[in-house]
Image (cartoon, coloured by chain):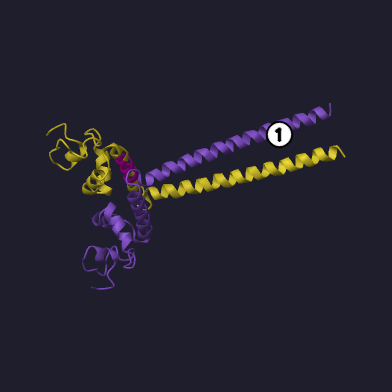
Chain colours: A purple, B yellow
Amino acid sequence: MNPKRCAACRYLRRRCPKDCVFSPYFPPNNPEKFACVHRIYGAGNVSKMLQQLPVQTRAEAVESLCFEATCRIEDPVYGCAGMISLLQTQIQKTESFLARTQAEITVAQIKHSQNQHSEFM
Amino acid sequence: MNPKRCAACRYLRRRCPKDCVFSPYFPPNNPEKFACVHRIYGAGNVSKMLQQLPVQTRAEAVESLCFEATCRIEDPVYGCAGMISLLQTQIQKTESFLARTQAEITVAQIKHSQNQHSEFM
């Protein structure tokens, strides 16, 4: 066993080539990270997606793929799309609360100016 | 050509079996839907994920998979994880605007009660 093989090559039981597309993003001390993306996308698809990207964007792409894969494993029906629905609902609630608060301010300001007006009558 | 083959079996150039796992969710008139999930997850992974789910949840699962695949094709680096970051930023902005508005109300109320107090002095 070569202890320097990346987590992906170790998982796939193959030699880790010098130009391994997985190696910079899947260190051997975190085998779970590769297992997640492999389970959802398959190693071949991940490799294809990474190879189609400029090298400087691959680390971010791996992080987002791992995030989505973890979400899909935790919630096999909705994945991280479920999280998006929840966030959108939260935004709608906060926005409607904000609108109500602003309406209350307007009402309070009108009442205040009416009071001041009646004091001078 | 059998015009009743589902979009998945048509894409994979195979006979569409009666118990096809794709057929209820990939009608032949929408080939793009299957092409998207196949490109990101691969037909085998999608089939595996669907088979692990109770039948009544599969339609929702297909919709969320298609959504995530479309996001990944449109944004190969961040996929729909990028959307989640944007939504979280939007929530933080709305919440901080709400907090500011509520603080302004409190200040206005204090000023108002101080005014009323000085009127009676």
Q: How many C-alpha atoms fall within 10 Å of the one at disc 1: few (<14), some, or many (≥20)?
A: few
x, y percent for residue A55:
34, 61
Q: Reply above or below: B113 against A48.
A: above
**In magenta stretch: residue B83:** no
| Residue A78 figure quarter | top left
The quadrant the N terminus of chain A occupies is: bottom left
Q: Between residues B89 and A29, which one lies in front from this camera angle?
A: A29
Q: Reply above or below: A20 against B91.
A: below
Q: Of helix, strand and loop, which mostly describes the magenta segment?
A: helix
| Residue A119 figure quarter | top right
Q: Between residues A76 and A80, which one lies in front from this camera angle?
A: A76
The quadrant the C terminus of chain A occupies is: top right
Return the residue at label 1: A109
Q: Between residues A58 and A107, which one lies in front from this camera angle?
A: A107
**Outermost residue, top direction?**
A121
**Outermost residue, right direction?**
B121
State left or right for residue B86 relative to residue A33: right
Q: Reply above or below: A43 against B86.
A: below
Mark 1 residue type? Gln
State left or right for residue B85 relative to residue B21: right
Task: Label 1: state its secondary structure.
Answer: helix
Subunit bearing disc 1: A
Span highlighted in magenta in the image: B61-69
State left or right for residue A92 relative to residue B103: left
Residue appearing at x 42%, y 41% in the figure: A85
x, y percent for residue B58:
28, 39
x, y percent for residue A67:
37, 54
